[in-house]
Image (cartoon, rainbow, N blue to C red):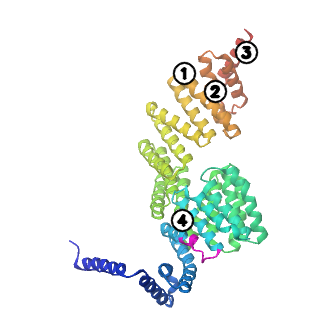
Amino acid sequence: MPSAEAAYLFRHAMMRLAAYELQPLTSRSELHGYAFAIIEQLPDAEHLVFELADHAHFASLSQPDPRRRQEMLERESRWLPRAMEKARLGSNFRLALEYAQRLMDLTAADITTRHNAALQAAEMSAMLGDFEAPPLLLQQAERIAARADDPKLEANRILCRVATVYMPGRRFHDALTELPKARDIYRTGGDRLGEARTLGYLGNLTSAVEQREHSLKHYEEAETLFRAMKHLRGVSTCRGNEGLVHKHQGRFEQAEACYREALEIDREVGNREGIPRHLGNLGVLYRDQGNFHKALDLFAEADDLFRELGDRPSTMRNYMNYADCHERMGQSHRAISLYQTAQRISEECGLGYNRACNIHYRGLALLKMNDQVRGEPVVEEAALAFASVGAHADATECWADLAKSAFKRGEYADQLRWSESGLAARAKAGEAVARDTSFRLLSLHAQAALAHSSFGPAAASASEALAIAPEGCDPILRSTLKAIVDRGQASAAT
């Protein structure tokens, strides 16, 4: 049974709402206007931005006096950006999105403020996993800025498009094409913050296309600018990204130092978005060094924070790290369950490439358990999923995994079918396919084609495989490939 106090409070709230709804619309407008005037005069009015923004908004509705209505709209345009920013910094993204939408529609606000609200709404939508919203919001931002003669607005849209459309969609070439224009605009206008942010994005993109030496240089240049401006959030982001580069290149001590400095800065400034990312990066670092239990503790801590933020894409990636850690510990069943959860989130967020990755990892985990009956169809599904998003190099990897599985079973028909699919995907991917993947696929195709007496195709694949064979290639496999080439030549001569 509820307490008497709780029952009283509930009834009181209902009575207050009923009394409010009985008021004529014009009376409600006046009441909100009075409330706004009282709160605005308080010494701590800056801490009551939500109340001020809302009272100003409702005071303007149904206001019969045009001058009074315009006055309240102007007051709302003053407080609404502050309310949006406070909600965002507090990681209350749903409320911040609501304020951003109101601000975009508020003609009393200036163009730059409304434009910025549209971009922030796009970034928050992407963080929450709604990747259909950013292109529409960017279009709205462009319409808002149509009458403004400020090139920085275009540069800001470029950065937002890179973060919310190009990067999630893996359209790295488009991003690298547009970013130099944004950098030039910021440099010409003396906007060091914009230039630093652009350098950070260039670092992310060059890292994504495996140009990590360039990415480290971009991050360090951005860090220098952020430190000069005493922009600590920017510094922490750069240090975290530098740690990723050091970790990938095997410099684990430097990576850990970067992660810990970034974590310390974000804890100091209260950056709730950055803290779980650095915890997750530390977890990956410990996992790769074999310290699995410490890694799992960090992933668990990051998971709680990502959930509090409502950051679904980051939650998904954290599940993938969780799964990989369990898999390395020999707990394949647990890993498969986590990959399935990550796949579901990626599907709900519309992240096609991440969806394909999770399907692939789940299939590989099943194959490692020698469960070909379930594993092979899953890996084939992953290959088709990668192809559907244009990730033909990843599709090639899947077909090679399938051909290898068929080889282990001695099923040359499946091996030939899957290796041929892999060669078709490889032709579409071009140089994006890793050299070892190409060698593995060509070798499997050569052996399967030979088993089906297709001597010409077998010899062609074997010859190409030998041309790219790694230094430590198995001598027996090398001899087999040479024999296939000789057999093909002999068959052609006959």
- Residue 215 image position (x, y, % from top left): 70, 56
Q: Is residue 422 visible in this depiction of the protein?
A: yes
- Residue 76 image position (x, y, % from top left): 54, 80
Mark 4–mark 1 contact, CB under 8 Å?
no
Q: For marks 2 and 4, give the one nearer the viewer.
A: 4
Q: Amino acid at mark 4?
A: Glu
- Residue 331 image position (x, y, % from top left): 43, 44
Upstream in the sequence, badge 1 or badge 3? 1
Which quadrant is the N terminus positioned in?
bottom left
Q: Residues within 10 Å of mark 2 (few under 14, many from 20)?
A: many
Separation (CA) of disc 1 from disc 2: 15 Å
Upstream in the sequence, badge 4 or badge 1? 4
As helix, strand or loop, the secondary structure at mark 4 comes to loop
Q: Quadrant of residue 111?
A: bottom right
Identified at 55% across, 40% down, the residue is 385
Identified at 67% across, 68% down, the residue is 145
Q: Which residues are magenta?
A: 102-110
Upstream in the sequence, badge 3 or badge 4? 4
- Residue 420 image position (x, y, % from top left): 61, 27
Q: Is residue 44 above or below residue 312?
A: below
Mark 3–mark 4 contact, CB under 8 Å?
no
Q: Residues within 10 Å of mark 1 (few under 14, many from 20)?
A: some
Q: Amino acid at mark 2?
A: Ser
Upstream in the sequence, badge 1 or badge 2? 1
Label 4, on which residue?
A: 273
Label 1, on which residue?
A: 413
Separation (CA) of disc 4 from disc 1: 51 Å
Q: For marks 1 and 2, give the one nearer the viewer.
A: 1
Label 2, on which residue?
A: 443
